[in-house]
Amino acid sequence: MDTLLNKFSSDVNGTIVGFDRLVFKGMIKPIMYSRGMESFLQRNGVLNKDFKDYAMKQSQLIIDSAEQYAKSVNEDGIAYINSPNIRKEALAHERQKKLGITEGLIGVWSCVESCNTYKATFSKTQSYPTLRFDRGKCKHLYFYFDDPIYGFMSIRLQTWAPYEIQISLNGREWLRRSLDKVGCGYLVNGNKFLHIDDYDLAQELLNEQSRVNFGHVISEFLPLVFPCMEEIVGSLGYYLTIWQSETAIDYIFNDISRLRICKIITCNN
C-alpha cells in the first residue's frame, strides 16, 4: 500500500510511476577480449604489434565522421572539453536554450577520458607480440539530441577500439514527447510534472516504455553517431545491457501550501 498516497489522497491530483534515468552500455562482444581482438586484426591483415597505429587511424575516421555530421547541422562542429569533470549535459542545455533548438542534434562535444583498450607486448611463450587488456585514455564523443520520440538524450562513443558506446535516456523526457504526440496537455518544471490532463493516459505511456525493444533504439542512432561502423568492424554489432535504471514516482499535489503541510506532518511522523 502507498502510505503517503493513502494519507494525503485528497490533496493529490494524480501520480505517475515509471522510468527516470535509463542508461545502456553497448559493446561489440567479439572484440571485447584480447584473443577476440587478435582474431579480428588477423582477419583484417593487421599484426598485433601494429594495433596502436591501426586503432589511431580508425579513431581519426570516427572523429572526422562526427565532425562532418556536426557541421552539417551547425557551423561549429565538435566542441572540445578540456576536463572530464565538466558536466556535458549542462553545456548541451545551455546551447539548446541559446540557439532555440526544439528538435534534432543539439551538439557534439569531445573529451579525453579513461577507457578500456589493449596493448601489444612481446610474449616469451608465443615468441611474438600479443595483445593484453589495458586501461588507457582516448577521445570520447558526446552527442546530445532533443529527439521527437525520446526527448533530451545523449550518446557517448569511445573513439578507440573496442568502441564502447553509452546511451542515456530520461523516462520523463520520453513521456513529455509521448504526451505531445497524443495531444495531452501538461505542465513541467525541469524533470518534474506539475500537472497532466490525463494521469491514466500518462501512466499507460510510461508502462509502454518498458515494453520497447531497446536494441532498436541504438540501431536508430548508429548511422548518425557511428556512420563508419561497417567500414571499421564489418558485420559485427553491439550487444546492449542496462547499466543504470532508476524508477521514480511523482505525486502531483493540488496546492503547494498543502504540500508544505504534508511535508511537515510526514517528517514529524
Image (cartoon, grey):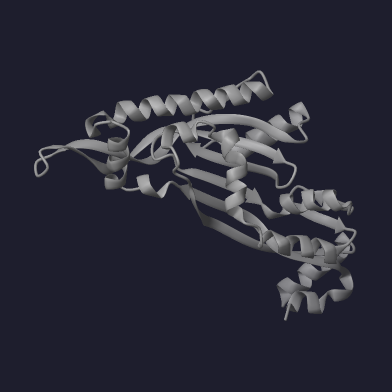
- Quadrant of the rendered structure where residue 267 is? bottom right
Residue at 78% in and 48% down: 177
Q: Is residue 87 left or right of residue 262?
A: left
Q: Quadrant of residue 232?
A: top left
Above-or-below relation of 124 to 64: below
Q: Residue at x 38, y 24 (%)?
A: 57
Residue 63 appears at what percent x and percent y? 49, 26
x and y, in percent, of residue 114 in the image: 40, 39
Of 38 and 209, nearer the camera is 38
Give coordinates of residue 158: x percent, y percent.
46, 37
Looking at this view, name the residue that lies furthest to the top: 75
Q: Residue at x 53, y 34 (%)?
A: 226
Image quadrant occupied by the N terminus? bottom right
- Of the pair 219 and 129, the residue shown nearer to us: 219
Task: Report whether 220 appears left or right of 127.
Answer: right
Q: Position of residue 34 (x, y in %)?
A: 28, 45
Q: Compared with residue 210, is residue 33 higher up or lower down, i.e. above or below?
A: above
Quadrant of the image for the C terminus?
bottom right
Towards the viewer: 213 or 117: 213
Up-down: is 255 above or below 98? below
Q: Is residue 87 visible?
A: no
